[in-house]
Amino acid sequence: MITTANIFEAVKTGVSVRDAAECYGIRSNHAGMACCPFHDDHTPSMKLNEDYFYCFGCGAGGDVITFTARLFNLRPYEAARKLASDFNIPVDIPLPEQNTLRTFRMDQYRCQKALDSYLNLLIRWKSEYEPTDPDEEWDERYLEACQMMEPMEYLADELAVGTLEQRRCTVERLLAGGKIDQLEERVSRLNRKEETEMR
């Protein structure tokens, strides 16, 4: 049984962008090009790959969760649940453990700060490294932004406006296995690297 802690990973592994597009009525040609559903597109301008999509007409891009969220006007988590349901990926919701209120608030603040720092980096990468030509090799930072922005935005939203139980569950998932430690260290390392490159 797949839990909410890894539903994004499970859906992206189990459902390709092209499969989702076909399931939701969008046909592509032999080259993987389709008319984009996100703008008034009369000639195929959207590239559908296994792991990502990109429209050379309107600039829409991302992974299968981004695609489904935009297509049905859903939040990322709702899109992931829809994909799990439509493609028969079983999902279960774990019950959170209890934390003291003081410890929980400190942990929540730490998680929010780490997610915000990473999201700011992803937003900048998606803007600065967006491809401008169909034949251009995609920068790894742009791909990471496309893949990670939706799940990170979902987690940040849960911490900001979720119920107490949702926030506790999210904090516990982020603290498990040192995920927040790794995220904090990575963001700090990337920021130091960029600062050095700018000098």
Image (cartoon, rainbow, N blue to C red):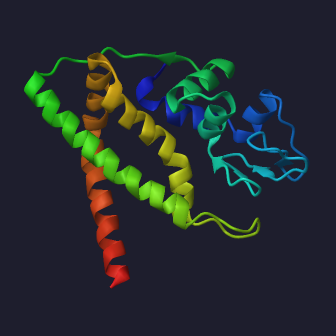
The percent coordinates of residue 45 (x first, y second) are 82, 53
In the image, taking residue 1 as reference, residue 177 lies left or right, namely left
Residue 17 appears in the picture as rendered: yes
- Out of 101 and 96, give the one closest to the viewer: 101
Residue under the point 40% across and 50% down: 119
Q: Name the residue furthest front.
A: 40
| Quarter location, residue 196 | bottom left
The percent coordinates of residue 108 (x first, y second) are 22, 34
The percent coordinates of residue 5 (x first, y second) are 41, 29
In the image, taking residue 150 as reference, residue 62 lies left or right, namely right
The percent coordinates of residue 191 (x first, y second) are 32, 67
Quarter of the image containing the C terminus? Answer: bottom left
- Out of 177 and 85, give the one closest to the viewer: 85
Residue 178 appears in the picture as rendered: no
- Out of 180 and 47, give the one closest to the viewer: 47
Residue under the point 20% across and 42% down: 110
Image position of 138 with respect to 59: above or below? below
In the image, taking residue 9 as reference, residue 59 lies left or right, namely right
| Quarter location, residue 14 | top right
Image position of 45 with respect to 192: above or below? above
Disc tally is 0
Residue under the point 50% across and 28% down: 77
Residue under the point 24% across and 48% down: 181
